[in-house]
Image (cartoon, rainbow, N blue to C red):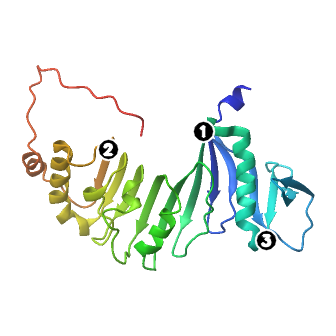
Amino acid sequence: MARFKAINTIVYGCSTTNQPYVYIPYKRGNDIIIRIMKNDKNKNCDFQLDLYGKIIDFRLNKENEQSQSYPIALFYLSEKRTVYECIHNYIFDFFGNAVEYYWKEDDYRCDLPIIPKLKNVSFCAKVHIRGCRADPENLETIFSQYPVLKAIQIDTDMFKGTFSPESKFYQTESIESEQFKHNIPDILSHFQGRQAFIQCGKDRNNMLVSDLIKFVNRWKSGEAFQNLEYLRIQVALFEIPQNNIMNGVGAKYVETTKITPKHSLPRV
């Protein structure tokens, strides 16, 4: 019961195969509830279950004696979304609103993954693009499928166009971005979420100082970034002109004898 009460998250972990593991994350690893896979016609199922009027084939994971035991739900391409929905509805009916649900796309590249619309599920993605041009319109198609964008890591060296200032990308709660080129999302101008982590390369350093000053001044005035809790910027091969930035944002010196304000923030 103690272990059961410790469950607060269910994750649909997906990669390029788009055949997710549904698991409970723990600090020391993951407990797999089930995997959802394309049906291999050369293998028979071990049993069938009727979930919400849909007969679904299952087989048991039998890789080796040491591997974790879990069932595998099988689908044909024509019924993929239906199987996803039936499995999720079953899990949701069991756990209800007591846990948070995430669809986690671990290795999105240049093609569009098939992401089902599931009840109360937030979207997380790791966008890793090399050797092809990232199209913001394609990414927007993915983002628009989910009302809540929980976390996005974006790592790309080629970006074709830009996101609009109203893009759902900028509404993501947590963004981690490698910005080694100038043609990447302008997080410091349009971010509406809670936490942002930015790594800048030498091509961005010349723009960083002016962008950072504008960002801090807009944040101080209350004009933007009201939801912001945490911002971290890492720069490469560049010494930040601290005095220029401090003067630009109107920073004031506080004597060591004075008590400075204290702020309590959520964990990163």
Picture layout, residue 81 above or below residue 161: above
- The amino acid type found where label 3 is placed reads Tyr
Local SS, label 3:
loop
Give the percent coordinates (x, y) of residue 51. 82, 53
The quarter of the image holding the N terminus is: top right
Local SS, label 2:
loop
Mark before the other along the chain sequence, 2 or 3: 3
Q: Nearer the viewer, mark 1 or mark 2?
A: 2
Asked whether, in this view, residue 106 is left or right of residue 162, the answer is: right
Contact? badges 2 and 3 (CB < 8 Å): no
Residue 240 visible in image: no
Q: What residue did someone put label 1 on?
A: 27
Picture layout, residue 16 above or below residue 152: below
Q: CA distance from mark 3 to mark 1?
A: 34 Å
Q: What residue did someone put label 3 on?
A: 76
The residue that appears at 37% across and 45% down in the rendered structure is 194
Number of numbered callouts drawn:
3
Give the percent coordinates (x, y) of residue 213. 15, 52
- The amino acid type found where label 1 is placed reads Lys
Label 3 CA crowd tier, 10 Å (few <14, some 14–19, many 20+): few
Q: Pick whichever, 70 or 191, lies toward us.
A: 191
- The amino acid type found where label 2 is placed reads Leu
Contact? badges 3 and 1 (CB < 8 Å): no
As drawn, the label of residue 228 is 2
Asked whether, in this view, residue 165 is left or right of residue 92, the answer is: left
The residue that appears at 34% across and 76% down in the rendered structure is 161
Label 2 CA crowd tier, 10 Å (few <14, some 14–19, many 20+): some
